[in-house]
Amino acid sequence: MPAPPIALSRDEVHVHCTWLDGLDDPALLASYAELMTPEERARNARYLFERSRREHLVGRALVRTTLSRYADVAPGAWRFREGERGRPEIEGPAGAPPLRFNLSHTTGLVAVAVAIDRDVGVDVEDAARQRTTAEIADRFFSPREVADLRALPAADQRDRFFTYWTLKEAYIKAVGLGLAIPLDHFTFLLEPPGPLAIAFAPERDDDPSAWQFERWRPSARHHLAMAVRRGAGPDLRVIVRDVVPFADARARSGSSG
Ligand SMILES: CC(C)(COP(=O)(O)OP(=O)(O)OC[C@H]1O[C@@H](n2cnc3c(N)ncnc32)[C@H](O)[C@@H]1OP(=O)(O)O)[C@@H](O)C(=O)NCCC(=O)NCCS
């Protein structure tokens, strides 16, 4: 049975999360595979590891079934095109609402963010996966972010690293340019009293006040961040849901801090 429709207003962003552990019902997975285009199937088969194939399969199903909750379009009827740097966008069917989305997957978790007519990016990371965090930060993060990390007790640095990482990924994914944007051309400001904010180096022509960011710890090992081009005006309402495509959908939490 299709999941019930959800209303999405222009001042909202919705994030749908699917947990992969235990998601192994063969009939359910077969229903996801049926949604794939021949190109998607061919790409899925090219992943070397079963884990990556599963993430990709569930990601595709999550995107299609999620979009269908916001439009009278069957999950299999969505058509996508790739932007200049590989960012998937909705191409059809004709008459579909102007939804924008972004997908991220990591070990155990897949997430998609959806908004109306706005740049949106999402990133999930499994902190248990990456070992050499300090070296990556030194090499790629901005000097201020590196100094902030290094000032923390060693036990807290790893957590902070993934907070920066997911926020930085969410921003470059929202913009759609991927790693064509040097990661040290923008800095996240995490500490209160101000809200979670971004600052840009002179090389990066963007307006910090146009952006809204959110971050969560959806599990002890997972980090999740979302970036949305809010424009002028108050913050958008952000809703996060845990869903299982074709099986279940329930709200997990309201807006984040
Ligand atoms: C491709 C990239 C956009 C995201 O890669 P990632 O973090 O490894 O992977 P995610 O799971 O978060 O995102 C992949 C999804 O983003 C989408 N995507 C692809 N290109 C994209 C782009 N240019 N912009 C936004 N989204 C994009 C796709 O839906 C893709 O899923 P698919 O491969 O199943 O189709 C890019 O940022 C990248 O190559 N990152 C490398 C990771 C890195 O070094 N990060 C340093 C952070 S500090």
Image: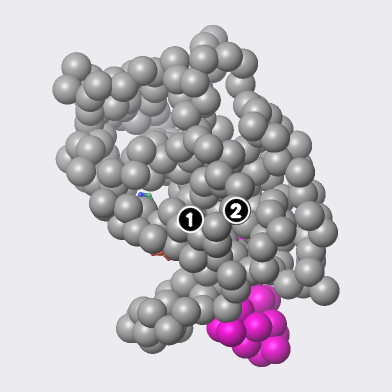
Residue at x-position 78% and y-position 60%:
249
**Residue 120 x/y as whole percent:** 48, 40
Residue 204: image x %, image y %? 23, 24
The residue that disc 2 covers is 96
Please provide percent x and percent y for residue 86: 31, 57
Q: Residues within 10 Å of mark 2 (few under 14, many from 20)?
A: some
Q: Label 1 belongs to which residue?
A: 90
Secondary structure of residue under mark 1: strand
Examine the structure image and report whether residue 147 is included in the region drawn in magenta. Answer: no
Question: Mark 1 or 2, which is nearer the eye?
Answer: 2
How far is the residue under mark 1 from the one under mark 2?
A: 9 Å
Which amino acid type corresponds to the residue marked 1 in the rendered image?
Ile
Front-most of residues 186 and 208: 208
Residues 192 and 62: in front is 62
Q: Residue furthest top?
A: 193
Placement of the C terminus among the 4 image quadrants = top right
114 or 144: nearer the viewer:
114
Residue at 39% x, 18% y is 208
Residue 31 counted in the magenta span = yes
Q: Quadrant of residue 242?
A: bottom right
Residue 221: tell me if it is visible. no
Circle 2: element type: loop
User: Magenta residues?
Assistant: 18-34
**In the figure, is residue 147 to the left or right of 222?**
left
Q: Quadrant of ligand 1?
A: bottom left
What amino acid is labelled 2 in the image? Ala
